[in-house]
Image (tube, grey):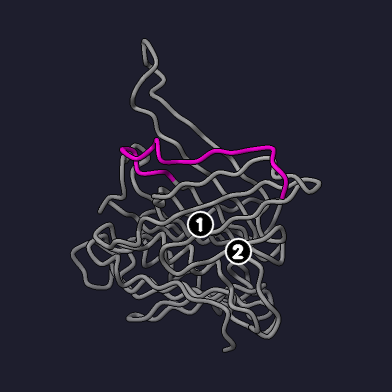
Amino acid sequence: MALAFSTADPEITLEEESARHLIFSVDIPPDSRARTKDVGVTLTVIGKILPDTAQAGNAADSTAKLMEWSVVPAEQKIAYRSVTLKVKSGGIVTRQYELPNAFIVDYYERFGNGEDIGEFTLVLKQMKNKLADVKVTGGFTE
Amino acid sequence: MGFRFSVTGGNDVSFDEYVITDIEFISDTPDASNARSTDLGVMLRITGRINFSLGAEIEDSTVELANWALMPSDQADCYREAQVQIVSGGQIVRQYTYPNAFVMAYTEDLNDEEGVGTFTLLLKQKKDLTNKIELKGNFEE
């Protein structure tokens, strides 16, 4: 199973060895008596921050671009990006998540001297008034 | 022990023993009640695998659960009939039927270690129609 994460405008394409774990969730308030308008769509991606030992000085992966995105002020247009995450298994796309107006809720990076690679956690949400544009598809060949 | 789960009243989907791994039936009243509360909510939590079919031959029905979870509240088919059967040795141990279920929470979890993903769906019967649910058990298949 491989996870391919990308954003458009500005573009970030994470290497497929970077992302390791994804959680897609849809929630409404837990005390609702019936289906509500207050729906939240969250996409969490956890992955590795890899060093490049072959070419010191070159960026080994694109995770630094996630770090830059995480500090973009809300006034700027590029705080919102179109995110696509594909899950590939056995030659087919098992899942494709599209969040066309995603913003970062949380972003963490952790490094320890035991593992020698870092780990990032990216928590994205679709802008709440544009929930109808979220698409989940799957089971097709690329 | 096997679990079967079906949803009707929208795009109908059903899942068999190879997909569903855990079922929880939850009936819940406020914890701070002084006496038996009329504020009774009944929920169902369904956990299963996101299997993929080789060559994309069979449609993966779990996508429909994700689309149901994303459905806006102004559409009629955001309420659907959900039925869960718990089967063991030719006997239906439990059969839960929620005729007006809606999605409280839906989560998909996929990683590069397990090979297949998992989903968790939390359903609730529309609260004013709680008495419409049907709970049965211990009958022959």
- Mark 2, residue position: A48
The residue sitting at the front extreme is B140
Residue drawn at (45%, 56%) of the image: A25
The residue sitting at the top extreme is B34
Could you tell whether B87 is left or right of B69 in the image?
right
* Nearer to us in this view, A117 or A4: A4
In the image, residue B91 sits, relative to residue A24, either above or below, namely above
Q: Amino acid at mark 1?
A: Thr
Query: Where's residue B25, x and y in %?
Result: 55, 38
Magenta highlight on residue B134: yes
Q: Secondary structure at mark 2?
A: strand
* Nearer to us in this view, B108 or B78: B78
Find the magenta span and give its range: B124-141
Magenta highlight on residue A76: no
The residue sitting at the bottom extreme is A142
Residue drawn at (81%, 46%) of the image: B89
Q: Secondary structure at mark 1?
A: strand
How crowded is the residue under tag 1: few (<14 C-alpha within 10 Å), some, or many (20+)?
some
Query: Where's residue A89, x and y in %?
Result: 67, 77
Kindly identify which chain the residue marked by label 1 belongs to.
A
- Mark 1, residue position: A121
Query: Where's residue B13, x and y in %?
Result: 53, 66
Residue drawn at (39%, 37%) of the image: B130
As measured in the structure, the alpha-carbon distance from the residue carrying label 2 to the one carrying label 1 is: 9 Å
User: In this orientation, does residue A57 appear?
Assistant: no
